[in-house]
Amino acid sequence: MKIDFNQGDLTTILKQTKKKTLRITLVRLLVFFSFIPVLVLSLTDYPILFLLLLLQLILFVYLIIRFNHFKDVEAFLKVLIKMDYERDLRRTRNLHSFDAGNEFQSKSHPFAIDLDLFGEHSVFQLLNHTCNISGRKLLAKKIKKNIDPANAQILRPAIDELAEDHKFLRSFEATGRAFIKEEKPKDKFYNWLSQPLRWKSFYYLPMFLGPILGLALVFGVAAGLLPIAYLSFWILIGLLLLGFVFKPLAEASKVFPSQGDIKTYRIWSSMLMDKKFNDPYLQEQGKTFNDKNNIPEGLKTLEQVSFLVENRINLVYLIFNLLFWLDFGLFWKLKKWKQSYENQLKDLDLIFDQWQVLVSLGSFSAEEKLVGDISWTEEELIYFKTLKHPLLKPDIAVANSLKLIPEEQTVLLTGSNMSGKTTFMRTIGVNMVLVNLGLRPFAEKLTVGPFQLYTSMRNMDNLGESVSSFYAELARIKQVLSAAERGEKVFFLMDEILKGTNTVDRVQGSEALIKQLSGSGAKGIISTHDIELSSLEEQLKYLKNYSFHSEISDNEIHFDYTLKPGPCPSFNAHKLMELMGIKFS
């Protein structure tokens, strides 16, 4: 599907296309309704009209082809217009109408449940530009993947290159969304590909004689040289012979992929065949689509053959088939196609799923205009400059900076309620996920050591499993400790640790946990309301205090959401409770 994006306003082009479609529809109806009188007259008094009938059928087929073309253009343009609308929604972080990917949530995953990667107002809603079920599953899998610096560094230049090619990104996504509708499982089709298609030698005879003699009979009857009974006898013979190929064609029609899938794959493969990438990774991903394999031509043939096979009971095809025995030619074309391409299509699903993920990441990078610098290092440090949360509106998100050198293992984060502690930690975690995908960070600069990410933030009870929120938190903490004991380089984010128990136990337990985490070599951030723990900085050289502050004026609490060194000097819970109506005596 080739659209000139510089041609003009998409809405205007869509209106013009609809007018063309309407004109073709009206002409097609006129041709169709003229069939009956021409057929009746040709069978009674004017056999010469058989020639006109034949021309009408040819014209009708042509009009169908043109009609389908303009309907495809309409579908493509509608999706492009919708994509522009969705881009504006994403820009303003109005995400409620997007696929939330709720089924990809996992309580046992090291970090997915805590970082708003899936669900309402999630990273998945920002990232997802995939077009089918398998594509979105692969994207979700990659979002949840363990930190892999080597893979991320391979992907980053590839995504940078894609982000610059807006036309390719838009065309690829719009094609899939326009034509992939109800997906049909392809397992039976791939199994059919592996089975032999039995072509018998005597099929060549009706394949060649059918069109030749059929056309001669039509002209003979039309010229009055032959009685019409000859044509009837010819059709009867054709019915008997066509029975030989009826079953294998019917079986093929049941297993073919949907027309939308084939059309999409054909257009995608043509785009990738024509595209010349500079990045080695993109070149490797596109190497399947070359002149030698000519996958676009194979898919084009499959699209044509599958359309004819699935529409063999159509009135127009039925008439042509009875007159010229077209099924034999169709069966031969199917056999030849199968011989040429049966071993080249089995991997296309996985290849195109991978491209859907790449297009999603490229589109996200382009929409967000990501240009931040990302560095992976073997040093056990975390450094970021002006880091922002991607799910906050860009114009209101507050950037923060921090450098946690190898000797500093733990940040103790204190602060008032709603001052930004949890959002700050999620900002770090989400950006680590994004750069692991090969994206650039929402920051001027981000440097990440050889860490695996673990979080303990959103711990909820589960009545069905008789699990309290406190027990759920302990299970998450144990997951972090076990990973560190296995030798993993752990970077952890823990929010309001041990909040489910009393103050004395919480402070003692928190102190013990901080020391145990350090002893295991783990590095990370712990937030707490227990200001007593901030005194540990004097005892533990690897612990540093940071905080978020708030100010109260005119019975209102004001936050600047800016990270500051040192413990929080004051808290606002008392004032918040007053503002909510709780009266203190």
Image: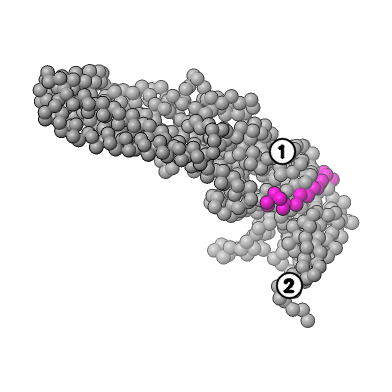
Give the label on residue 579, or none.
2
Residue appearing at x 39%, y 26% in the figure:
301
Q: Position of residue 276 (x, y in %)?
A: 59, 24
577 over 75 or under it: above or below: below
Q: CA distance from mark 2 to mark 1?
A: 42 Å
Please name whichever residue, 215 or 15, is drawn nearer the observer in this view of the structure: 15
Question: Which amino acid, mark 2?
Answer: Leu
Identify the residue at image location x=65%, y=39%.
Answer: 365
Tell me if residue 94 comes above or below residue 354 in the rendering.
Answer: below
Q: Badge 1, how many Cα within 10 Å: few under 14, some, many 20+?
A: some
Measuring 69% from the left and 65% from the top, which residue is drawn there? 500
Q: Is residue 45 visible?
A: yes
| Residue 226 locus on image (x, y percent) | 11, 20
Highlighted magenta segment, given as a residue range: 392-407
Q: Nearer the viewer, residue 584 or 169?
A: 169
The x and y percentages for residue 533 are 82, 61
Disc on res. 371: 1
User: Does the stretch in magenta take in 396?
Assistant: yes
Q: Could you say whether the residue bearing mark 1 is in a helix, strand or loop?
A: loop
Name the quadrant containing residue 363: top right
Name which residue type carries label 1. Answer: Val
